[in-house]
Amino acid sequence: MIRVLVTDDEPLVRAGIRMILSSGEDIDVVAEAANGREAVDLARKLAVDVVLLDLQMPVMDGVTALAELRRAAPRARVLILTTFGERENVLRTLVGGSAGFLLKDSAPPDLLRAVRAAAAGEAYLSPATTRQVVDLVASGDTARRSEEARHRLERLSDRERDVLALLGEGLSNAETGRRLHMSEGTIKTYVSRVLTKLDCGNRVQAALLARDAGLRAAAPEREHP
């Protein structure tokens, strides 16, 4: 069973998340927390596998709680609950070691998928969040970043570069598979290989490299009548 701690300052939100997660036979919501401080204390005591963590909370916000959780419960994987208006904080939690991001208006299957991916040691990042974070950090010392990114991309094969280019656009594995006429499972294998070769912890970091290197996906092939 995947032991989950749900953290949000709104009781109705916590209840909704608990109801959705309870539909998964492999998921057990062992506790709820109303703020970051409670989440840290409970994660330390209960040995949870996954913490769902809201960013905007009283007493201790999600960004601060993430850092505390990394120290107090290093084995717990933290999924950030976020909205479109919190891009800067999303970037901070990415650097801080979160296992991924889940938009609060995500569909119930996405919530289940995200928890299972986090528990399996994988990163879960919605395509919309990926695109936002990539756009957010598209400024700064671009010349140095571009040179470093192009050098790192030399490790990839042509097909791996194709996959990375679409990942950089924020496409999901299924969407990438349709563009490249490959199965979703094959794309997942390619993504894992790309992350390993580039020494990236998750899809967003790889997408940023693609953006810095100026990697662009080829236009999709037209279907002839």
Image (cartoon, grey):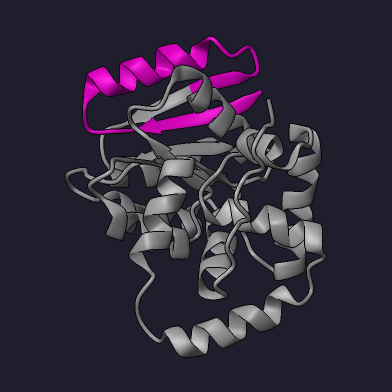
- Give the quarter of the figure containing the N terminus: top right
Point out residue 117 in the picture as x, y percentages from the top left corner.
63, 36
Say if residue 200 shows up in the picture.
yes
Q: Which residue is drawn at 29% across and 46% down?
A: 55
Q: Number of callouts in the render? A: 0
Residue lying furthest left:
58
Q: In which quarter of the image is residue 158?
A: bottom right
Residue interval drawn in magenta: 1-29
Q: Is residue 67 visible?
A: no
| Identity of the residue drawn at 71% across and 37% down | 177
Q: Which of 148 and 8 is in front in this view?
A: 148
x%, y% of residue 147?
58, 87
| Image quadrant in which you'd find residue 173 | top right
Q: In this view, does 180 lie above or below 115?
A: below
Q: Is residue 224 left or right of residue 202?
A: right
Residue at the image position 51 percent from the left and 74 percent from the top: 212
Relative image position of residue 88 (x, y in whole percent): 29, 60
Q: Is residue 8 magenta?
A: yes
Where is residue 136? Give x, y as percent. 34, 63
The reply, left or right, for residue 209 in relation to residue 58 is: right
Left or right of residue 150: residue 64: left
As rendered, which of 119 and 105 lies closer to the eye?
A: 105
Q: In this view, does 181 lie above or below 76?
A: above
Image quadrant holding the C terminus, namely: top right
Q: Is residue 204 left or right of residue 81?
A: right
Queried whether the magenta region covers residue 4, the answer comes back as yes
In-front residue for pair 69/98: 98
